[in-house]
Amino acid sequence: MAIESKHIAKRSENLSEWYTDVILQGELADYAPVRGCMVYREYGYAIWERIKTMLGRRIRETGAENVYYPLFIPRSLLLKEAQHVAGFSPQVAWVTIGGGEKLAEPLAVRPTSEVIIGTMWAKWIGSYRDLPVLQNQWVNVVRWEKATRPFLRTLEFLWQEGHTAHRTEEEALRETEQMLDVYREFAVEDLSMAVLAGVKSESERFAGAAETYAIEAMMPDGKALQSGTSHFLGQNFAKAFDIKFLDDDNTEKYVWTTSWGVSHRIIGGMIMLHGDDNGLIMPPQAAPVQAIITPILYDETKAETLAVAEKLVKLLSRGTAFGEPLRVRADLDEATSPGFKFGKWELKGVPVRLEIGPKDLAKSQVIAVTRDERSKHPLIFDLDAGTFEFEKLVELLAGVQKRLRERAASELSSRIFETANFEDFKDIVAGKGFAVAAWDGTTETELAVKEATSATVRVLKNEVTSGKLACIYSGRPARYVAYWGQSY
Amino acid sequence: MAIESKHIAKRSENLSEWYTDVILQGELADYAPVRGCMVYREYGYAIWERIKTMLGRRIRETGAENVYYPLFIPRSLLLKEAQHVAGFSPQVAWVTIGGGEKLAEPLAVRPTSEVIIGTMWAKWIGSYRDLPVLQNQWVNVVRWEKATRPFLRTLEFLWQEGHTAHRTEEEALRETEQMLDVYREFAVEDLSMAVLAGVKSESERFAGAAETYAIEAMMPDGKALQSGTSHFLGQNFAKAFDIKFLDDDNTEKYVWTTSWGVSHRIIGGMIMLHGDDNGLIMPPQAAPVQAIITPILYDETKAETLAVAEKLVKLLSRGTAFGEPLRVRADLDEATSPGFKFGKWELKGVPVRLEIGPKDLAKSQVIAVTRDERSKHPLIFDLDAGTFEFEKLVELLAGVQKRLRERAASELSSRIFETANFEDFKDIVAGKGFAVAAWDGTTETELAVKEATSATVRVLKNEVTSGKLACIYSGRPARYVAYWGQSY
């Protein structure tokens, strides 16, 4: 049966157009009638709900519980931490009128919630027995961005932000590193992505942080995508908001805090990483629909085929994959051709298609077709007995999940280039991938490199202890070897 | 073992103070450093998550899927539906500055999303084959309220708003009524509340609606609490936003739309309805913690008791109640007395406490104590065999759920008073409950009654067809018999 694809740009030729096409035509999202904002349609929001489920579970396992802090932050609170306000002020949306009156104090629409959370913690935390505080919230935030693209950069975006307070520096550092691990595992295991994980340079640090860790993915156009960050905030916010506790030695101490976040941006990364010229390829664990039943209808067998397809949805929904109920649907539209249906669900990236035509009906089978390899596998069912070859279907799903992960990992490896030559460096970061190169550790050099190549340090690889390496740009003794790249 | 309650106001003496006390001291929520806004703490947000789970399931069963529309609405869109803008304008928070610059067009922080949704539907809906559209979103909204109280009325609040578009008037009306039923069943079955359900008077209609339906609960102070609304919007928004479709008769028609919402306000209603002088009583289906294990510690048996309590949490979490895993925790704090623990978890309204002391340890039992009746029931366990008297525990939980529901129902019945005498009417609505009284159906009369008694029509009971009844206030022939009451 021919696949009739909608007219989308070829991913292999124009990644940027392809990206917009699959989002709009796959009905994940649309542009909102507000500059820089997007509307999540059903399929796109279902992906976000999958992320909430999977990452939410991992966050809960670290002991953090969900809370909700207000959307609005009075201007005076935002001013309390100097670096923080300097970093975020230019991006803030301000509410200045409410209830028909000019407000005495403008309210920021939260760009992030450290300051309002710090204010409450100062009130709640009194003793070492109140620590640690481990909180998380799934909310909308607003940052006034100039150039925007669905998922990747939007004025309003959905994210989770975790905030923790600890008794000691070591504990807070452990938390920061633990969350980096959680994000890395989530990206790799649940979304089949490949990422670098490490510490950021000073210039790329979160405003107000003592240290920022990040996971960075590599996109097919050779640009890096920051996909999650975990910040060690030291005592910066504790001091600005006076968050103190009485320790068991009877002295008052400031707490140590962290914050960490993953936004809907990671959906953009997942889309770009896994698609092909026919559309999206959803990793089965993240897929809102894991298997789509597509009946092939002929007049004589139409009624029976549709009835069987409906029953199969019910039967299959009782199965499980990756520890959750299978997510199965049937496309029972009688007005569209099988080829059109195949194209529609390939565009949406459903990992397995289950075809059922007259011959299959006679054999009590569906033909499972994997999205990535289009390999075909008959799966036998018995509706009366309520049986289905579930193990085979789950194996096919696990196969897609694994192949995407392996492909992403090998893609990433193939896009990491060590170099000690600045001409090579320029060539690498201009579309090839990450350059692994020595850096003297100064912001001055990093900015000069950015000026010359548009590339920055994405994460540090390691410290240089020997003293023999020279910085790729300044030639001075290197302090770090870093992963450099252009970024989204 | 004595119960040591925190010092909270007596519900029987001062409902209003008690309400604030249980919310603050039960650590459900706190006042935010922004006027009229609240912070959800872990326990309070867990209640909201329970509501999302339970009501979300009911909404999905009607066929609606989750989506997400932007927070900001350009001023020009809000102006398109005349009644809608008139109703909401005074309550809007306006963003006027973004990215350091004054905006050419102010952006409303959504007070509700009909207009931005209408804009997108006009783009997406083309044919009768695109209908119905059944969407829902769980979001934050902002309405500039003057007097605020946690959950009951806040500037920013959490809610779900459903929006649907239909081919025919009948179908849209059916949807409106179906959602009223969903809300009623949710309130009664899941939250053990008792509500009246019916049509609102014109003056209490949603701005832009052709008809508004609501569920109304009766609080212990004799005031009604509107706890959910379902609006039949006719073609008002379809015409304002030009949402048309080509029908199968090849003519262009406007769609018929509905919208419906339940907010965090229903948590306030549930709290007020079910508590007692010791604190909250959570209906088990809505309870974040259904059973709290409270070990009673003596020096000789402390280690063993704590170890057993921990194992019991794991064992019990494998059980189910109401079709979901049991939600069980243990209070292993060694520094607080059993009496303090009992008081703490009673204040939080946990439906069943499982006490385990030295004698229970010897008998391999816990003593289950119900929150509402404090009746005691030994439940036998065997940690080695992994067995527990789950059925008995589930029965106790179901008992609490049922008793709360029955108590709420009988409370509601006892607070409905028929009257044909305006002096009686005034007395009823001033703290007793709902007055069932005839009304001539005019807004003029309703406003005059409100002026005289602070009461309004909460919902209509029935139309008057005989022509023999006289309006309680004007004496003119009645058009309706209505439920009148003061309201939150």
Image (cartoon, coloured by chain):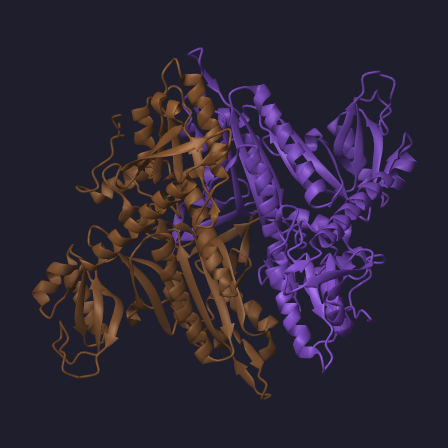
Chain colours: A brown, B purple
- Total residue callouts: 0
- The C terminus of chain A, quarter of image: bottom left
Q: Residue at x 43, y 74 (%)?
A: A174
Instruction: State which quadrant residue A482 falls in.
Output: bottom left
| Horizontal arrangement in the rendering, residue A224 relative to residue B102 (left or right) | left
| Horizontal arrangement in the rendering, residue A481 relative to residue B195 (left or right) | left
- Relative image position of residue A265 (x, y in whole percent): 36, 52
- Relative image position of residue B215 (x, y in whole percent): 70, 37
Residue closest to the eye, B287 or A356: A356
- Relative image position of residue A263 (x, y in whole percent): 40, 54
- Relative image position of residue B42 (x, y in whole percent): 59, 61
Q: Residue furthest top?
A: B249
Q: Residue at x 52, y 67 (%)?
A: A134
Residue closest to the eye, B73 or B10: B10
Residue closest to the eye, A332 or A239: A332
| Residue B147 seen anywhere in this rendered image of the structure | yes
**Does A479 sit above or below residue A88?**
below
Q: Residue at x 70, y 51 (%)?
A: B284
| Horizontal arrangement in the rendering, residue B483 relative to residue A446 (left or right) | right
| Residue B242 seen anywhere in this rendered image of the structure | no
- The N terminus of chain A, quarter of image: top left
Instruction: State which quadrant residue A206 falls in.
Output: bottom left
